[in-house]
Image (cartoon, helix red, strand yellow):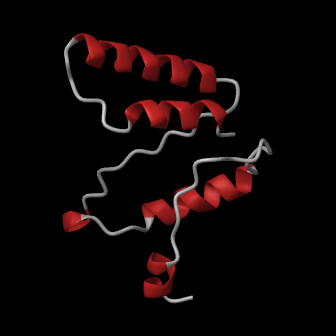
Amino acid sequence: MNALDAIAQRRSIRRFKPDPVPEELIRQVLHAGTLAPSGKNSQPWEFIVVGEARRPELVAAMHEGLAWCREHDIPLGSAENTARIMAQAP
């Protein structure tokens, strides 16, 4: 598959199977991410893998951030939906 076909056929996933993601697949995806181009090859990204044991902590932090935004009248956009998706993603 060439790059244009991959872009044209991409899709958003919002429902996940409960199966755990194999660690080797996670490593492959992270490696691919490090190969992405960046301005002046600065590679400013950081990747954080959150496993099943710490996912509730991540989701709780997301909800705290959402509550803070609501209190300060900051638009949430699709953040609430993102928090819901993160709560169910393996």
For the residue pair 23 and 60, the one nearer the viewer reads as 60
Judged left or right of residue 18, residue 37 is: left
The residue under the point 50% across, 39% down is: 48
Q: Quadrant of the N terminus?
A: bottom right
The residue under the point 20% across, 18% down is: 73
**Most extreme residue toward the bottom, as rendered?**
2
Judged left or right of residue 73, residue 18 is: right
- x and y percent of residue 37 in the render? 32, 69
The image shows residue 77, relative to residue 69, as above or below, that is below
The residue under the point 27% across, 64% down is: 38
The residue under the point 60% across, 30% down is: 87
- Location of residue 84 (image quadrant): top right
- x and y percent of residue 60 in the render? 51, 17
For the residue pair 55 and 14, the one nearer the viewer reads as 14
Judged left or right of residue 90, residue 13 is: left
- x and y percent of residue 62 in the render? 44, 23
- x and y percent of residue 17 in the render? 75, 47
Q: Quadrant of the C terminus?
A: top right
